[in-house]
Amino acid sequence: MSESPAERLVDLLGLERIEVDIFRGDSPQEHLQRVFGGQVAGQALVAAGRTTDGERPVHSLHAYFLRPGVPGVPIVYQVERVRDGRSFTTRRVVAVQQGKTIFHLTASFHRPEPGIEHQLPLREVPRPENLPRLADELREHLGELPEALERMARRQPFDIRYVDRLRWTEDEVRGAEPRSAVWMRAVGPLGDDPLVHTCALAYASDMMLLDAVRVPVEPLWGPRGFDMASLDHAMWFHRPFRTDEWFLYDQESPIATGGRGLARGRIYDREGRLLVSVVQEGLFRPHRG
């Protein structure tokens, strides 16, 4: 019996420990040009977390995508124990594939303590139950999905629902604000390990954050006019959460210039609590004719 997409995600995050601070992660043979960046970020964070005592949750990560990974080739994660202090634990992770460094991550762990409390509120958006699944919305517009999209829909570990209707024409795109928002949750249970939920969210956070950069330029699900790649990624984790429960990923792009676009994201739960803040820069190069 084949695994569900959620089970495959948990397996993907279940690294093999091959030395005290060295781990190996699978990289599925997907029909992609490069390994999905969220997979590398999630696996690297697992490696970092497995070298701590587990008493301090991760509160931030900062990462650089240095080279594209090759699908189907395992990735080795080498962890450096930078600091084990009284309040904070710091780890640096280098991801290596075929003898080349493809990714760097630094993660900091801290047990929450008393302090000031405030947050930006969740804006008014439709609830996920009132929105169509992404795959259904694509089928409604496209009819039968192209093979690549159908395969993606079957293997997608997250239920994704766009808050705003998808735009399909240049006229619809023109004048749109550079922002996007989606409700998401894993399509099945992910277990009870908090680190798995954190790393699964790191995986999800790279899936569509750069959408906000593209919204004023081209339809999100039409042919792309740009080659696009994540350059760096930063996350701050504010509160505990479960990635198999609904969360809103609210994204905006304050600027795109010089071939790069910046995107910011805020992740809320259904009750409006701010869980995670995300920032990413991406490279956008026009297709060469």
Image (spheres, helix red, strand yellow):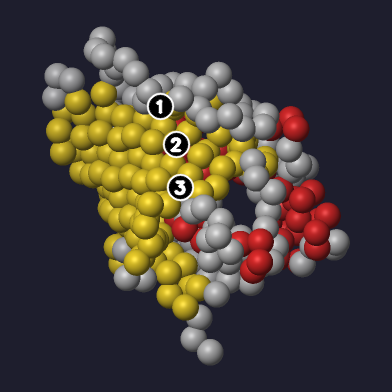
- The amino acid marked with disc number 3 is Glu
Dot 2: within a 10 Å radius of its alpha carbon, few (fewer than 14), some, or many (20 or more) residues?
many
Q: Using the image, tell me which numbered label, if any, was put on residue 266.
A: 2
Q: Residue 79 occupies which quadrant of the picture?
A: top left
Picture residue at 50% right of the left edge, 81% below the top: 287
The answer to whether the residues at label 2 and label 3 have Cβ atoms under 8 Å apart is no
- The amino acid marked with disc number 2 is Arg
Judging depth in this view, the residue of 289 and 155 nearest the camera is: 289
Residue projecting furthest to the top: 114
Up/down of 176 relative to 131, above or below: below
Separation (CA) of disc 2 from disc 1: 9 Å
| Disc 3 secondary structure class | strand
Picture residue at 53% right of the left edge, 30% below the top: 123
The answer to whether the residues at label 3 and label 1 have Cβ atoms under 8 Å apart is no
Percent coordinates x, y for residue 260 in the rendering: 36, 65
Percent coordinates x, y for residue 256 in the rendering: 38, 62
For this view, does 202 lie left or right of residue 101?
A: right
Nearer to us of marks 2 and 3 is 3
Q: Using the image, tell me which numbered label, if any, was put on residue 93.
A: none
Chain-order first, disc 2 or disc 1: 1
Picture residue at 16% right of the left edge, 28% below the top: 84
Instruction: Please give the residue where the numbered disc 3 appears in the rendered image.
Output: 252
Percent coordinates x, y for residue 142 in the rendering: 80, 63
Residue projecting furthest to the right: 143
| Disc 2 secondary structure class | strand
